Image (tube, grey):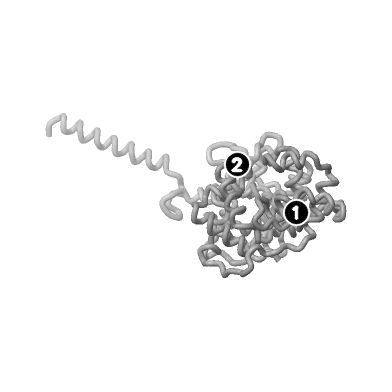
Amino acid sequence: MPKHIVRLVLLVGALATAAYAAKIFFTADSFYRYGHYRGNSVAEIASDKPKYTSPQSCRSCHAERYAEWSQGVHNSADIGKVVKCEVCHGAAGRRDVRGMFQHSATGPDHPNNVKLIVPTDTTELCTRCHEKLAARPVAQRQIVVATHAGTQQCMTCHNPHSPKILIGAAAPNARPGDVTAGKAKATTCAACHGAQGISGNLPGPNLAGQREAYLVDALKAYRTGARDNPLMGPLAKGLSDSDIENLAAYFSGLSCAHVSSVDKQAAPGQTTVASRCAACHGASGVSPNPMWPNLAGQSKDYLLNALRAYKGGGRKNPIMAGIANGLGDADAASLAEYFANASCR
C-alpha cells in the first residue's frame, strides 16, 4: 500500500479517535436520561426561579395602592381570585448566578437594586385575563376588546389596583346644594336648557335628572377653562362654588322627560353600537357613575354634534376621542338616535 494512503488512513483514524474522546469528555453523564437533553437540567430549570416577596412587602412604601388592591376584586380569596402585585410588576427579588448553570434565588430585593416593571400597555396586560374567550369561565369578567374601548388603555377608565373602581368615580357632593337657591339661579339657564331643564328644540342639552356630581364637575370645568365653550365659559366664571352646587342640586332633582312622544324599539345594529358606551353611560343611557352624564333622552342633534366635536377635537376627552374616532357617520347617527329614543326614567 502506498505510504501516502497509509498516512491518510492513520490521520482519519486519529481524527475519529479524537472526536470520540471529545464526545465522551464533553457529553454530560445525564444526557439522554429523559430524552435528547441533559437529565440534570430538569432540576436546574426547576430551581432557577425568581424570588417573590408577596404583596405584604409592598405595603410599607405603597400603603395607598396596597389598600386599593387588598380591598378590591383582585384580592378576592373567597372566590379564588388573587392577582398579586408581582403578577403585573415582576418579581421583587433577583437570583444570584454562582457559576454556569448554578443559580440561587437569594439575590437583592426591591427597592435596593431591583427596579420593578411599571406596565405601560395595559390593553395587552389586562386582556390576558379579561378578553372574551369561549373557553373562559363566565364568572370571569370578560370584554370584547374592539367594542369595549377600542385602542384606549384600560387605565384611562379603571384603577389598575382595583379595576372595579372607575377613575373619576365619586360619591355625590358631601355638601348638598340648596335647591331653592338653585332654582332662582337657574333662570339664566332657561334660554338654552329650558325652564325646567328640558331643552326640547333649544341648543343646550337636557339638564333635568342629570347626575349631580357630573353637573358640578362640568360647571367647574367651564369656569376654569378646562371645557371650552364661548357661551358657558363666561357664564360659569360668574358662579361661586355654592352657586354651582345649588344649580346641580336643582337640576338633578327635576323629573326628566322623554324627548320623543313614542318610545321606539331599538334596531339590532343600534344596540350593538351602543354597547361601546355601556361601561360609562349604562346600557340604556343612564350612567352608573355619578361623574359621567346620562345620555338617555337627549336630542339626537345634540348627541350627534357632541360626537362630531369629540372626533374633530372641539371637545377634549381621551376616552370619548377614542370612541368617536372609531365611529363612522352612520354609526354616530345610529348611536345618537338610540339614546335619543331611550327612556331617561
Disc 2 marks a residue whose amino acid type is: Gly
Q: Residues within 10 Å of mark 2 (few under 14, many from 20)?
A: some
Relative to the observer, which residue lies in front, 140 or 228?
228
Seen at 49% across and 56% down, the residue is 330
Please indicate, yes or no, whether residue 177 appears anywhere in the rendered image: yes
Q: Say if mark 2 contacts mark 1, CB within 8 Å.
A: no
Seen at 81% across and 47% down, the residue is 244
Relative to the observer, which residue lies in front, 20 or 107?
107
Furthest toward the top, the residue is 4
| Residue of label 1 | 70
Relative to the observer, which residue lies in front, 188 or 344?
188
| Residue of label 2 | 314
Q: Earlier in the sequence, mark 2 or mark 1?
A: 1
Q: Residues within 10 Å of mark 1 (few under 14, many from 20)?
A: some
Please indicate, yes or no, whether residue 74 appears anywhere in the rendered image: no
Instruction: Give how far across and how far down residue 86 sits, in percent.
Output: 66, 47
Helix or strand or loop: what does disc 1 sit on? helix
Left or right relative to 61: residue 137: left
Seen at 67% across and 58% down, the residue is 200
In which quadrant of the rendered image does the N terminus lie? top left
Can you say whether 160 is above or below 97 in the image? below
Helix or strand or loop: what does disc 2 sit on? loop
Q: Nearer the viewer, mark 2 or mark 1?
A: 2
Disc 1 marks a residue whose amino acid type is: Ser
Furthest toward the left, the residue is 1
In which quadrant of the rendered image does the C terminus lie? bottom right
Quadrant of the rendered image containing residue 223: top right
Quadrant of the rendered image containing residue 51: top right
Work out how far the residue at label 2 is from the one at label 1, CA to CA, in angstroms: 40 Å
Instruction: Give how far across and how far down residue 43 sits, in percent.
Output: 55, 50
Q: Which numbered marker is on residue 231?
A: none
